[in-house]
Amino acid sequence: MGKAADMLERRRPEPPGAQEGAPRTPETPRQIVDARLTRSVAFSIHVCAVVLGAGALYVAQDLILPLALALVVTLTLSPIVRLLARRGIPAWLTSPLLVAALAGALALIAYTLSYPLSDWVARAPQIGYEIERELRDLRSSFAAVEQASERVDAITGGDAEPGVEEVVVREGGFLATASSGVLRGAAIVAIAALLTAFLLASGDRIYERIVHVMPTFHDKRTAVEIGRAIERSISTYLLTIALINTGLGIVVGLLLWAVGMPTPALFGAMATLLNFLPYIGAILGVAITAVVAVVTFDGLGATLAPPLVYLACTTLEGNVVTPLILGRRLELNAIAILIGVAAMGWLWGAVGVFLAVPLLVAFKTVCDHLPSWHVLGAFLGGSLTRTAEDAQARSDALGGKD
């Protein structure tokens, strides 16, 4: 039967132009226009999908944000739960304990730093006055501009019709806005903690459901491999970065205490938190330290010492410590990080800024495991050759399919 099929296949006439070396039929102008129109329509559909997806993330952030935060924390703590499960401790017991321990540690840190933070908030008007006094000499250079602006204000103010009262709408104060933001953040954290406990307790049942819905064995294997790789990448990144940032905060706090900076523990905690934001966190930390040093110290050397110490610590951490520990496996492009942080900050605020890099790590992991996406993975990772070789190796290991 096989020989007969082969004979029929050999006897089957090939279509014109299919023979080797036969000239290709030139495309007609109508075919060229149709091809360009198809590409344009496809590009427009992709742009509309991105815009609608961003709009959905913004509108439904109160629903999606706790879920995204819970997924990131679950992926970070899953290896610990799985390790303890192999030691005989069930997941339903370790999951709530881990979540409770994490929440308790964050609450203890917040309570410890609440007094120095409230002290700085109370001193905010005085700090503003000190900054204005320090910059008073610079303002003299803009005296002419200010006088011109005052004249313009006087002219525009004199045009108001007599008998017409000016209505001023006053917005809520800073404390009211901050309190509403704190309540919303507390609700998001509480929902995310509850979801994290349930997701950790479920164990590998999520992977079992993924395997069940995938149609082919290759798809099942690829999905499980991508899921495990995302889990390893995010867990390795966040746990390692948390340890590095904690060490950075301790070093910054000790060095700022050595140069006479007030409340060095608060600045150490600030360095730990801000360093979760690559590039941007270090710049903000140096700027805040410099402002406080300007209003605290008098001499030039004493004023420059705290921001220089902070800058030296973050530079050493970013260029030596983190690359040495993490290596190049989780390398991300600086442009991609900045775009991701800006986009997620616009969509989800401070929590989105924190989630931007872990989500980029997860997306880059997916791109690295799909050869057809290796160009995008190369852009995110900054190395086209290495990403293409890794993607091709994974494709060969999985049977040469995407």
Image (cartoon, grey):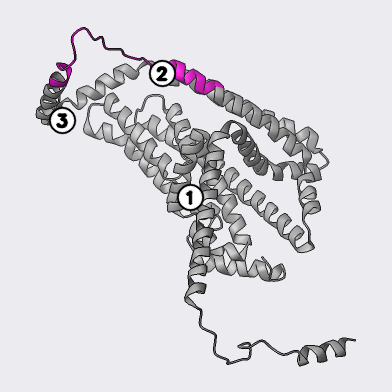
Occupied quadrant, residue 175:
top left
Tell whether position 175 is magenta.
Answer: yes
- Residue 174 - label: 2
Q: With 352 as the anchor, is 254 left or right in this view?
A: left
Q: Earlier in the sequence, mark 1 or mark 3?
A: 3
Mark 2 falls on what kind of element? helix
180 relative position to 64: left or right? left
Characterize the local packing of mark 1: few (<14), some (14-19) or many (20 or more) Cα atoms within 10 angstroms. Answer: some
Q: Is residue 222 magenta?
A: no
Callout 1, which amino acid? Val
Determine which residue is flagged by label 3: 138
Location of the C terminus (image quadrant): bottom right
Counting from the top left corner in percent of width and height, residue 203 is at 77, 42
Relative to residue 166, is residue 318 drawn left or right? right
Instruction: Find the residue positioned furthest to the right.
Output: 1
Q: CA distance from mark 2 to mark 3?
A: 29 Å
Residue 320's place in the image compared with 265, above or below, is below
Q: Which residue is mark 1?
A: 321
In the rendered structure, which amino acid carries the disc numbered 3? Leu
- Between residues 207 and 129, which one lies in front from this camera angle? 207
> Of marks 2 and 3, which one's residue comes earlier in the chain?
3
The part of the chain drawn in magenta is 155-183
Q: Position of residue 113 (x, y in %)?
A: 49, 23
Q: Are marks 2 and 3 in contact (CB under 8 Å)?
A: no
